[in-house]
C-alpha cells in the first residue's frame, strides 16, 4: 500500500529528480521516496519520533503525557531532514508549487492520515501573513490542503490577524510568545467549527507553536476534535 500510494504521487509530467538527479523522473523519484520516506513510530499527539511500539498501538511521548498539547492528534510523513528539508525549501521559497501533489501524496502515505481525512468535517490550511504571501506568491499549506481534500478545504475560515517576525531564529518559548494572539476565526462564520472534526494542514512543524495557537482558537470555538497534518516534523523542536 505504501509503495502504491507513493507511485500514484509521481504521475505528473516527468522532470529531473530533485534528490538523485535521475532523468526523466518525477519531482522526487520513486526510488528516493522509498529510500528516504520509510514510516517511523511517532507520538500520535505531537508527531515526534518515539521508540517502536511493542504491540503496534501508538503511545504518546513523555512530554505529551506530562503536558497534553491542544491537539487531539498530529501526524507527519517524514522528519525535516535531507532530502525533504531541501524539497520543502524549494517548494516554499523558490516558487515551486508544482511539488504540491507529490508532497500531499507523501503525507497521505503516513499512517492514520487517510482515516483522519475521511473522518474530518473541515480542512483548514495554516494562514500566512500578508507579507509572506506576497513574498512566496502562494500559501503552501492551502496548496497541500486542496490536494488532500478539496471539497473539505476552507481557506477563509482561519485567519492570521497579526503579522509576526519569522519563527526560524527563535527558541521554543519565544516561538510561543511570538504567535500568541496571531490567529482568529472569521467572526461571521466561527460557529461553523462547533462540534466539528477539524484538520489543520501545514508543511513543516518545528516547535508546534503556530499549530497550537490555531488549535486554541478552534477549541474556544467549540471544535469537537482537532488533528494536525504536516509533511515534515523537526525531530528536535528546540
Image (cartoon, rainbow, N blue to C red):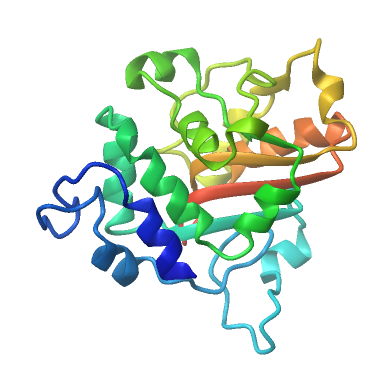
- Residue 207 can be seen, yes or no: no
Quadrant of the rendered image containing residue 94: top left
193 up-or-down from 114: above or below: above
At 34% from the left edge and 22% from the top edge, which residue is drawn?
136
Q: Where is residue 54 in the image (x, y as percent from the top left)?
A: 65, 89
Q: Where is residue 198 in the image (x, y as percent from the top left)?
A: 74, 40
Report whether 29 appears left or right of 191: left
Q: Nearer the viewer, residue 15 or 223?
A: 15
Residue sitting farthest toward the bottom: 54
* Residue furthest to the top: 188
Q: Residue at x 77, y 30 (%)?
A: 217
> Please, is residue 211 above or below residue 186 in the view?
below
224 left or right, relative to 18: right
Residue at x 57% of width, y 74% of height: 50
Residue at 34% from the left image edge and 58% from the top image edge: 81
Compared across the picture, whether 211 is left or right of 145 comes to right
- Residue 104 in percent (x, y) is at 46, 46
Name the one closer to the observer, 35 or 129: 35
Q: How many marks?
A: 0
Residue 30 pos. (x, y %): 28, 63
The picture quadrant where one finds residue 168 is: top left
Q: In the picture shown, does residue 157 fall above or below 230? A: above
**Residue 90 seen:** yes
> Looking at the image, which is closer to me, 72 or 150?
150
**Is 83 on the left-hand or right-hand side of 121?**
left
Amino acid at each position: 500500500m505504501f509503495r502504491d500510494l507513493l507511485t500514484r504521487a509521481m504521475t505528473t509530467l516527468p522532470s529531473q529528480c530533485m534528490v538523485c538527479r535521475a532523468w526523466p523522473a518525477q519531482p522526487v523519484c520513486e526510488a528516493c521516496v522509498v529510500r528516504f520516506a520509510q514510516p517511523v513510530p511517532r507520538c500520535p499527539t505531537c508527531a515526534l519520533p518515539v521508540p517502536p511500539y511493542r504491540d503496534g498501538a501508538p503511545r504518546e511521548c513523555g512530554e505529551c503525557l506530562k503536558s497534553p498539547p491542544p491537539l487531539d492528534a498530529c501526524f507527519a510523513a517524514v522528519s525535516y531532514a535531507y532530502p525533504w528539508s531541501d524539497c520543502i525549501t524549494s517548494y516554499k521559497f523558490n516558487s515551486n508549487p508544482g511539488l504540491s501533489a507529490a508532497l500531499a501524496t507523501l503525507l497521505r502515505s503516513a499512517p492514520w492520515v487517510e482515516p483522519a481525512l475521511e473522518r474530518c468535517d473541515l480542512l483548514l490550511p495554516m494562514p500566512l501573513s500578508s507579507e509572506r504571501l506576497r513574498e512566496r506568491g502562494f500559501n503552501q499549506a492551502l496548496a497541500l490542503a486542496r490536494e488532500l481534500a478539496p471539497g473539505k478545504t476552507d481557506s477563509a475560515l482561519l485567519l492570521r490577524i497579526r503579522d509576526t517576525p519569522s519563527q526560524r531564529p527563535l527558541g521554543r518559548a519565544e516561538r510561543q510568545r511570538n504567535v500568541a494572539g496571531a490567529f482568529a476565526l472569521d467572526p461571521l462564520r466561527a460557529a461553523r467549527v462547533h462540534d466539528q472534526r477539524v484538520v489543520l494542514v501545514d508543511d513543516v512543524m518545528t516547535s508546534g507553536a503556530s499549530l497550537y495557537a490555531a488549535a486554541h482558537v478552534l477549541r474556544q470555538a467549540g471544535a469537537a476534535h482537532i488533528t494536525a497534518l504536516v509533511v515534515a516534523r523537526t525531530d528536535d523542536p528546540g
